[in-house]
Image (cartoon, coloured by chain):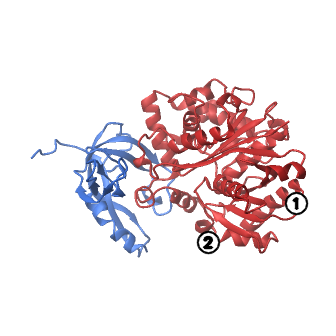
Chain colours: A blue, B red
């Protein structure tokens, strides 16, 4: 049932934990240990704010096994405010609302249920920002 | 390269309920052996993407060698998502070029139809990033759609502007007896087709199917004594790019396609004008446009104009998808790249029937895996 596979990604799925490159300072998500910009080791953990905007999006009508009951649903490329792009579903909005440049924030939602007795996988999705975020 | 093709073979591309993966492989191999007038080879490279997922069958190298009566030879599977076919040929070329293998057989095979829709969609998505793309419900059609939407946004292009790719593919496929779809397509139908992953529709994406194609290679020197029309492999290169779409430096640029094309063209010593036809990876119309741009046949953001202006037609500046491409001939996953090679060989030999490009001497094939993580480019030439 791939329990360990989902368990070891919990920091990424629930908290959007990526990395910072020690050498060039670029922020990385997903974490990859070798910086994609300068190829130096990047192992300093960094928790992303979860704020970003829609870079591109699609509505999936023909869903893969495990997602049939969710269709139609929207998957987007979200450009996080720190720079990286993350692939994630859009949620808490109608199918015709999305647009390129739409401000969004990360929330935790159910991603998939592996059958009646299987595990329920939770993770990040993104929803429209309905109010100005609090600035500390 | 000093490596030449002496035989090619292919099966029809369609749903073949009655045919197993081993039989499919054998039919293509048998045709290639007949074509090359040889009965045995020294090594076998099987290009396949999904047998483990869809047929619960791995270890195809030994399985196919055994079933084809070639027990004892060197045989392995080569996997690079839907670039598996092109990658398998690349391994055959390397084997012959190294001098350690005299004659190598590359077969691409895919059996898509033993499982139904959602399972196949999921299996195909294993060519994407399972942890960070597939677990968000992304599919290959969704991948194409994310690129296409951004392309339309950045370059101010409408959905209808992509129709020319599918119309051209179907016009050519209509003349290919082995093609999955032999119907012509009207541009008006393209924009109103049912959506798979908005804006990608049924008439935008290539249909999945069963199929196998095979190519036999040996040294250029031996080839000249063996067959009347050897086709020389003058360029052969694989390159890679960011694995996941979100990690690409530029969403609208196929870096691996650019790199592998540059390498192959440098090896061949050819420029764009020398290339008479281009079998590209039109799994989606957007991939056709991006492939034309990355390989340098079109400027960035203008690949779609080649379809609009008829430059990709059989009598155009650069004919593409001359037997229907992935869109109309059909897309048998890991076999697709091998079909491209077989088709270029038939064009160069003047054996393309109604699909023939006049006086074709140099042809290019480009096979792309996943969202662009792998690109394989081959350039073939026939000498007078």
Picture coordinates of residue B202, whole percent (x, y): 59, 44
- The residue at the point 38 percent across, 46 percent down is A77
- The residue at the point 63 percent across, 66 percent down is B51
The residue singled out by tag 2 in the image is: B56
Name the mark on residue B38.
1
The chain letter under disc 1 is B
Q: How many marks?
A: 2
Q: Nearer the viewer, residue B282 or B234?
A: B234
The chain letter under disc 2 is B
Dot 1 falls on a residue whose secondary structure is loop
Measured in 3D between alpha carbons, the distance from the residue under mark 1 to the one under mark 2, in whole angstroms, is 32 Å
Picture coordinates of residue B303, whole percent (x, y): 56, 30
- Would you identify the image quadrant in which residue B85 lies? bottom right
Q: Is residue A36 left or right of residue A11?
A: right
Where is the C terminus of chain B found, in terms of image quarters? top right
Picture coordinates of residue A136, whole percent (x, y): 9, 47
- The residue at the point 36 percent across, 36 percent down is A100
In this view of the protein, can residue B184 be seen by the observer?
Answer: no
- Would you identify the image quadrant in which residue B105 lies? bottom right
Farthest residue, direction left: A136
Q: Is residue A62 left or right of residue A36?
A: right
């Amino acid at each position: 049932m791939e329990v360990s596979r989902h368990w070891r990604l919990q920091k990424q799925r629930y908290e959007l934990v990526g990395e910072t490159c020690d050498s060039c300072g670029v922020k990385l998500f997903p974490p990859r240990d070798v910086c994609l910009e300068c190829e130096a080791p990047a192992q300093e953990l960094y928790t992303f704010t979860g704020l970003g905007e829609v870079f591109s999006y699609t509505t999936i009508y023909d869903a893969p096994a495990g997602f049939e009951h969710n269709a139609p649903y929207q998957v987007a490329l979200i450009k996080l405010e720190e720079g990286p792009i993350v692939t994630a579903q859009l949620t808490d909005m109608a199918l015709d609302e999305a647009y390129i440049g739409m401000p969004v924030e990360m929330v935790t939602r159910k991603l998939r249920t592996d059958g009646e007795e299987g595990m329920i996988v939770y993770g990040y999705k993104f929803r429209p920002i309905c109010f100005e975020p609090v600035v500390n | 390269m000093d490596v030449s093709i002496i035989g090619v073979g292919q099966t029809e591309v369609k749903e073949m309920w009655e045919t197993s993966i081993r039989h499919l492989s054998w039919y293509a191999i048998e045709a290639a052996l007949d074509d090359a007038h040889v009965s045995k080879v020294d090594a076998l490279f099987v290009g396949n993407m999904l047998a483990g997922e869809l047929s619960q069958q791995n270890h195809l190298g030994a399985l196919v060698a055994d079933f084809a009566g070639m027990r004892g030879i060197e045989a392995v599977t080569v996997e690079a998502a839907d670039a598996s076919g092109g990658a398998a040929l690349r391994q055959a070329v390397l084997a012959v070029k190294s001098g350690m293998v005299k004659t190598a057989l590359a077969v691409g095979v895919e059996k898509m139809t033993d499982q139904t829709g959602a399972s196949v969609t999921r299996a195909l998505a294993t060519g994407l990033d399972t942890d960070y793309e597939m677990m968000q419900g992304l599919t290959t059609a969704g991948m194409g759609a994310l690129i296409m939407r951004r392309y339309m946004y950045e370059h101010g292009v409408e959905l209808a502007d992509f129709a020319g790719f599918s119309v051209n593919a179907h016009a050519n496929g209509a003349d290919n007896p082995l093609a999955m779809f032999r119907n012509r397509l009207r541009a008006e139908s393209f924009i109103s087709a049912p959506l798979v992953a908005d804006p990608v529709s049924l008439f935008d994406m290539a249909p999945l199917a069963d199929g196998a194609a095979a190519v036999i290679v040996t040294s250029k020197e031996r080839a000249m004594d063996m067959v009347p029309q050897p086709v020389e492999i003058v360029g052969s290169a694989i390159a890679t790019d960011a694995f996941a779409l979100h990690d690409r430096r530029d969403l609208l640029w196929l870096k691996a396609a650019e790199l592998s094309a540059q390498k192959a063209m440098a090896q061949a010593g050819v420029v764009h004008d020398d290339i008479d036809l281009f079998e590209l990876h039109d799994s989606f119309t957007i991939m056709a446009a991006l492939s034309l741009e990355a390989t340098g046949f079109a400027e960035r953001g203008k690949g779609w104009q080649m379809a609009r202006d008829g430059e990709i037609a059989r009598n155009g500046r650069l004919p593409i998808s001359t037997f229907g491409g992935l869109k109309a001939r059909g897309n048998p996953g890991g076999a697709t790249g091998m079909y491209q090679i077989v088709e270029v060989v038939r064009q160069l030999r003047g054996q393309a029937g109604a699909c023939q490009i006049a006086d074709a001497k140099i042809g290019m094939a480009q096979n792309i895996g996943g969202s662009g993580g792998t690109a394989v480019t081959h350039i073939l030439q026939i000498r007078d």
